[in-house]
């Protein structure tokens, strides 16, 4: 998990020494990837523990069908950010995760493709003055 976060930052051109400097643009993506990776890992562990009956005769809870595709989506999202940019990767990943988790209303998926990525990027670039790196295939807002 730590290696994947460090790899995503080094692919974006940031040296590893900037990861722990809070004023660095590399700090927040590294912190966010650690948080997302930790939460994902806890979901995997919980699924492994919960799927095994605690006592003989206890009912077995249902499996989590979207866990593996959601984790694959997080990995693909982390790999895609340096290549297509934060805006394009988020516009694809956010509604894809909603689809995996069961949302099937197309108008809500379209709203999720535009609104959350735009709000997050606007928050960081306008209010917090933290710029996201541009990728080869990204465009400016």
Image (spheres, grey):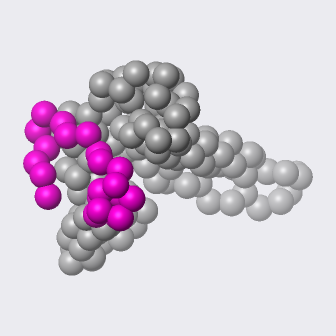
Is residue 15 visible in the rendered image? The answer is yes
Which residue is nearer to you in this view: 92 or 87? 87
The correct choice, above or below, for 58 with respect to 73 in the image is: below
Let me know if residue 140 is in the magenta part: yes
Position of 74 compared to 11: left or right?
right
Q: Residue furthest right?
A: 55
Q: Quadrant of the C terminus?
A: bottom left
Q: Which residue is at 19% across, 50% downward?
A: 88
Q: Position of residue 27 (x, y in %)?
A: 48, 39
Q: Quadrant of the N terminus?
A: top right
Q: Which residue is at 47% across, 41% downward?
A: 23
Q: Position of residue 3 (x, y in %)?
A: 50, 23
Which residue is nearer to you in this view: 115 or 28? 28
Q: Position of residue 49 (x, y in %)?
A: 74, 46
Which residue is nearer to you in this view: 11 or 57? 11
The correct choice, above or below, for 134 with respect to 115 in the image is: above
The magenta-colored residue range is 120-141
The correct choice, above or below, for 76 with respect to 102 in the image is: above
Position of 55 compared to 124: left or right?
right
Which residue is nearer to you in this view: 138 or 48? 138
Is residue 1 visible in the rendered image? The answer is no
The quadrant in which residue 95 appears is: bottom left
Dominant secondary structure of the residues highlighted in magenta in the image? loop
Let me know if residue 46 is in the magenta part: no
Q: How many callouts does the rendering have? A: 0
Q: Which residue is at 26% across, 34% downward?
A: 82
Position of 56 compared to 92: left or right?
right
Q: Position of residue 63 (x, y in %)?
A: 59, 54
Q: Which residue is at 20% across, 40% downward?
A: 134
């Amino acid at each position: 998990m730590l290696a994947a976060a460090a790899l995503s930052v080094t692919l974006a051109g940031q040296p590893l020494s900037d990861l722990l400097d809070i004023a660095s643009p590399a700090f927040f993506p590294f912190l966010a990837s650690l948080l997302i990776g930790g939460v994902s890992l806890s979901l995997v562990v919980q699924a492994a523990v919960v799927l095994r009956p605690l006592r003989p005769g206890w009912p077995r809870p249902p499996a989590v069908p979207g866990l593996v595709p959601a984790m694959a989506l997080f990995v693909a999202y982390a790999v895609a950010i340096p290549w297509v940019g934060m805006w394009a990767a988020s516009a694809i990943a956010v509604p894809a995760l909603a689809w995996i988790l069961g949302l099937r209303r197309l108008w809500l998926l379209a709203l999720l493709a535009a609104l959350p990525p735009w709000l997050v990027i606007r928050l960081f670039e306008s209010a917090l003055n933290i710029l996201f790196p541009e990728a080869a295939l990204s465009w400016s807002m």
